[in-house]
Structures are given as structure tokens and as C-alpha cells.
Image (cartoon, helix red, strand yellow):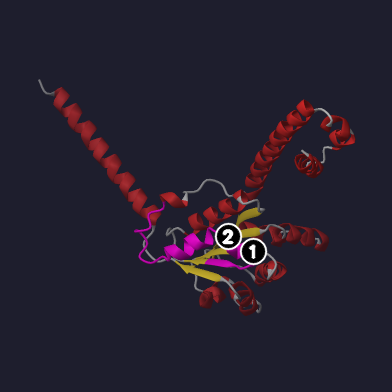
Amino acid sequence: MPTQAAELRTRATELRLHGLLAHWADVMADPEAASRVAQWLDWETQERSRRSLERRLREAHIGQFKPLADFDWSWPAQIDRGAVEDLMALQFLADATNVVLVGPNGVGKTMCACNLGYQAVLAGHTVLFVTAGQLLGDLAALDSDSTLRRRLRHYAAPDLLLIDEVGYLSYSNRHADLLFELVSRRYQHKSTVVTTNKAFADWGEVFPNAACVVSLVDRLMHRAEVVRIEGDSYRAKEAQERLAARTRQRASKAGAASRKAKP
């Protein structure tokens, strides 16, 4: 069929199979060969998609995380589940909107950010996950202006940049300036997800005496989706549960040994 042959040629062109395209007329003249080409194009497309996904996942540095499906929504004292699930549709990427996840330690901010990043990779986007300490330490260590510009381009390039743990450490004015430069480069062009344990009003504690803090917050907050999570640390809860389970296990073993020792 002419339409099918045209579609196959378009796919071969997109895959840059120039050798095949050079002999296209001869191949399409043989119905059996044309049928085999269709199968080969399917295989090549699937394999390239698989390898692309693996590469983007590897370069995203998301690491291991708890899937959103396993998240205990009843544990946080406050969380807008609807807002988080809406974000998973990734419309904020199309709008170049930022996302800010605010809350104390251990309530699921990083988990939500990682799920957003993973979903974006599955949708074909480029993603990079980095902690604030890693990001600012990396940039601040560069002395050469040209090297710094290249590194800033590296962090500005991904469709989605995930910056974790802003607020757990305090930084110098230089760190603040570098973060402001990066956020400004991405502003209204690419989406950035930030997790923080500090309200924006307290970011002066994170970047003491930095003149750019107000402008930094302004660019992050403009058209941003802010999700606040409140509650006790889920990691502390899991640690207590593991400790209780080990205590019961040891007590059970001790009881069994005691019964076995009796005549």
C-alpha cells in the first residue's frame, strides 16, 4: 500500500537508516521484503526507546525511592494528595512552572520529588536530581569563569531539575549568587522542583546576608505550585517499628531457648 510504504519510509528516515533508504525502491518492490522491513523498524524503534529510557534514567541520578503507590497518605498530618497526583500528570513541565515541596524532615518531600522525576523520564524528558549541597558545592569549587559557565549550562539544560534539601545547611553569599544565576537561567524556560524544610520567609537563615535572596525566592515562587506537608517523620516511625520487631524477635528466641533448656 502506498500509504503504508510512505509511513515506513518516514520511520526509516527518522531512524536515519541511510543504507536502507538508498535501496528503498528495490525493497518496496518485494512485498515480503517490505513486510520484513516493517518488523525490523518496529524492533529498532523499540530497542532505541529502551536504550534512551535507560540512558535518561542513569543520567537523572534519581536512585532508589518509594513509589507513590506505596506512600501512606494517612501518615502526614497535612498533605494535599490531589495536588501531588495532579503534578504527576506533568502539565507543570509544559508550562515551565516550578514546584516547591515544603515540610519538616522525613514527611515525604524527597519521595514526591523522585516520583515526579521518574514520571518525567518515562514521558521522554531529561531530568537531573541533585541535593543543594552537591549542586552548590560543585559550582562554588570552580575557579575558571569558562568552566563555571559550562557547569551552569549543565544544570540549566535538563527539562526538569530536582534540587533536594534546601535549608538543611547554611551557605555563603557566593553560593546564593550561584543558585540565583541557575534559577534565573531556567526561569520561565524549564521547570525546577525544590524540596525544603524552611518557609521562604526563613530563607535568609539559609543564605545569611545574601542580597539576592528576595529575588531568588521571587523567581522560584512566580507561577510555582507549592505543596506543604506537615507531620512527624515517617522514617522515624519505620525505625521504631523495626526496633520493636527486633525486640519481639529476640524475646521469642530467648523464650524458645529457655523452654528448650528445661528438663
Q: Residue at coordinates 52% horizontally, 63% vertically from top-left?
A: 168
Q: What is the secondary structure assignment of the residue under circle 2?
A: loop
Residue 223 image point, x, y percent: 59, 74
The image quadrant that residue 261 belongs to is top left
Q: Residues within 10 Å of mark 2 (few under 14, many from 20)?
A: some
Say which amino acid is labelled 1: Ala
Q: Is residue 195 visible?
A: yes
Residue 101 vs residue 123, the one in the foreground: 123
Q: Report the residue marked by disc 1.
A: 94
**Residue lying furthest front in this view?**
1
Q: Left or right of 84: which side holds 35?
A: right
Q: Quadrant of the N terminus?
A: top right
Q: Report the residue marked by disc 2.
A: 90
Residue 189 vs residue 29, the one in the foreground: 29
Q: Quadrant of the C terminus?
A: top left
Residue 255 image point, x, y percent: 18, 32
Q: Is residue 143 visible?
A: no
- Image height check: is 86 above or below 27? below
Q: Residue at coordinates 50% horizontally, 57% vertically from top-left?
A: 112
Residue 29 part of the magenta segment: no
Q: Left or right of 149: which side holds 257?
A: left
Residue 245 image point, x, y percent: 29, 42
The stretch in magenta equals 71-100
Q: Residue at coordinates 80% horizontally, 41% vertically from top-left?
A: 9
Q: Left or right of 207: which side holds 48?
A: right
**Residue lying furthest top in this view?**
263
Mark linked to residue 4: none
- Image height check: is 43 above or below 226? above
Residue 125 vs residue 134, the one in the foreground: 125
- Image height check: is 223 above or below 125? below
